[in-house]
Amino acid sequence: MADPTPPVPEPGTNMGKALPRYEARAKVTGAPLYADDMPLPNPATALFVTSGIAKGSITSIDTSEAAGLPGVLKVYTHENAPSRQDLRHFMKGGYVADSVMPLAGPNIVNDGEIVAVVVAEDLATARDAAHRLKISYQAEQPATTFGSAGAEEKQITAGKHDVGDFDAAYGSAPVTLDVEYETPTMHHNPMELFSTAAAWDGDNLVIHEPSQFVWQLKNGAAETLGVDAAKVEVKNPFVGGAFGSKGIMTQRTGLIAAIARDLRRPVKNVVMRDQGYTLATYRAETRHRIRMGAESNGKLVALSHEGSEVTSRQDDYFVAGTTATAEMYACPNIRTGVSLVKADRNTPGFMRSPPETPYMYALESAMDEMAEKLGIDPVEFRRINDTQTSPTTGAPYTSRSLMECYDEAASSFGWSKRNPQPMSMAQDDWLIGYGCATACYPTNMMPATARIVLTPEGRAEVLIAAHDVGTGAYTVMQQIAADELGIDPAAITVRMGDTTLPPGPVSGGSMTTASAGSAVKAACEKVRQRFGGTVPAVDDMSAAFRKLGSNRIEEYAEWAPPGSGEDAIKALYKGKFGGGGGDEPKPLMYAFGAEFVEVRVHRLTREIRVPRMTGAFAAGRIVNPRTARSQYLGGMIWGLGQALLEKTELDLLRARYINDNIAEYLVAVNADVPEVDIIMVPEVDNQVNSLGVKGIGEVSNVGTAAAIANAVYHATGRRIRELPVTMDKLL
């Protein structure tokens, strides 16, 4: 069924123009260069060889046959690896997503660890040589996941809340709920494979790598290679999909750059699709126990959310999404906590809406279950417990338009036609179910810098080392500059993704527009000040420049969120994360949404179809409704995949990923995508930042999985609490 919403949405209140994508023509004609497309003089090809065990050690490697193959330049193992410095995990103040340095020694700590690198004149030769390596291992029994022998559990303080007296309130509540939920391991699978290309010119190094934070990559590479960061340049104008997997530097970068230095020749490496499952991060599996107590009128009196996440032995990566779930609904007695289960796996990392996606799935599923117990409509149950202040600190939300989102989405979806009784709606052999859920995402921000150049011809250039990971950041930065300078967007060129430019934020956490956009706005304000507050019209520009005695105006600006501290910009230039500081209660800054879905489940086969979805979202000022709609659309489609398709299958005995390819790791394709109605609810929030914008890239996939699971229950009377919801679980 065709999407009824026009592809170019009409801007509403507090929304900018729906301008076409800045790079649209270039992308469809193949003009922009991605990292692996960048030309290098006579590059060699490096191919990773990865471990066949998840825990143990290498007892021997025979490289003689591989090294003797014509066209092979060198085979690297732990016995002759190029020197590098250890790097700490980024959550400990370092630069890397996984602290295990490849080829550092014979020990193996997870499946798919790099055990050798074959460098050859071409990929075919490198692959042939890789198959000729003879590697022997001493294997040990690995711990794979929850419940595995040898897995270690530890409590963490992140996401911990203890407000009021949960035990007493829960024990005396007239209506209670005690349920458990699970989400599986998930992998990013971006279209653009992970890659690194490194070329030295004396002591100067140029790196081409898909990255969501080039200034971090620049500084991390310099540290591991023992060189001055000023001599390292990272170029990455476009990213072909990331979703968090390219947000933090991996150890691969330093290894390839060190090999290029050792060979004195440019080297390129592309990580094969299956290798990307272990040489990049992923979303770890989670478990949740939620307990709720409520009065008979629907008011929550007690809420407990205990989460558990898998991580690696070497790194304590966590998302601790109870930070969000504790804030969602009014409740006087709240207890939350998170534990880590350390297993013999590679370290997980950011994946679109890292804390919110698994934790809000559990909360929003529980909200649906509690609403049914109470005999209250799920939308009205959320309305009864809506809040404009933090339940944990009392701090206010800068704006919270959640119920406005529910009202608009419910009206458009036709929620009033829902019969609340499970299995009460059907058409022919298809059981019909309606479900809904809340979506949320915090307004994250980071320090950012930008430079604006204006010429007498009325043309401007925006320079900032932020990133466009397919989200429309080029378009939005162009649009912000055009609005601030009062000139035609077509007269503005945007340059991004290069460390020769002023540093921008990581392209993650839905913070690019808020952070980079605020820096661009600040630089534009400085340009306006040069003309007394208003940039002259194009016809008057030359005369104004002559009056200033200049043929070029260039202004640089720095911006940081309130409370960032005086060293925030210095930290940004070092490639470090940063944001607001201090422990005092702060206003809560969130984008919200309400998602509604219709599912159809065949009464005999239990085949599941989702014919339509509706999402209404409020996120402050919308700079460009066209690119915003695309973001919301993509998020909900991904949420559909999370609900029904996505799961990385684990070999529990060997701690290995089984379906490490895009044939068996299922993602949503065109045939799966239903009618999707996107509603942008007008919202004004002048407190979040000078632009009044909130993040939109991640909010829309937060509620989808719960909405679909809730709809499946409504259709079938079967409550599936373990994602993905599949036919076999309904039979």
Image: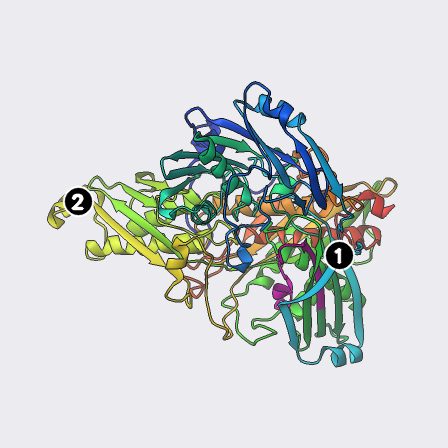
Determine the residue positioned at 77% across, 75% down.
296
Residue 470 is at least partly visible in this image: no
Please tell me the numbered disc located at residue 527. Answer: none
The picture places residue 676, in percent across and down from the top left corner, at 62, 44
How many residues crowd around disc 2 within 10 Å: few (fewer than 14), some, or many (20 or more)?
few
Query: Eyeballing the image, is 532 above or below 371?
Result: above
On-image quarter of the N terminus: top right
Q: Secondary structure at mark 2?
A: helix
| Three-letter code for the amino acid on which mark 2 is drawn | Asp
The picture places residue 500, in percent across and down from the top left corner, at 35, 43
* Residue 322 lies in the magenta stretch: yes
The picture places residue 47, in percent across and down from the top left corner, at 58, 31
**In the image, 293: left or right of 235?**
right
Taking depth in this image into account, of 716 and 66 the one nearest to the observer is: 66
Name the residue beneath numbered marker 1: 151
Q: Earlier in the sequence, mark 1 or mark 2?
A: 1
Residue stretch in magenta: 305-328
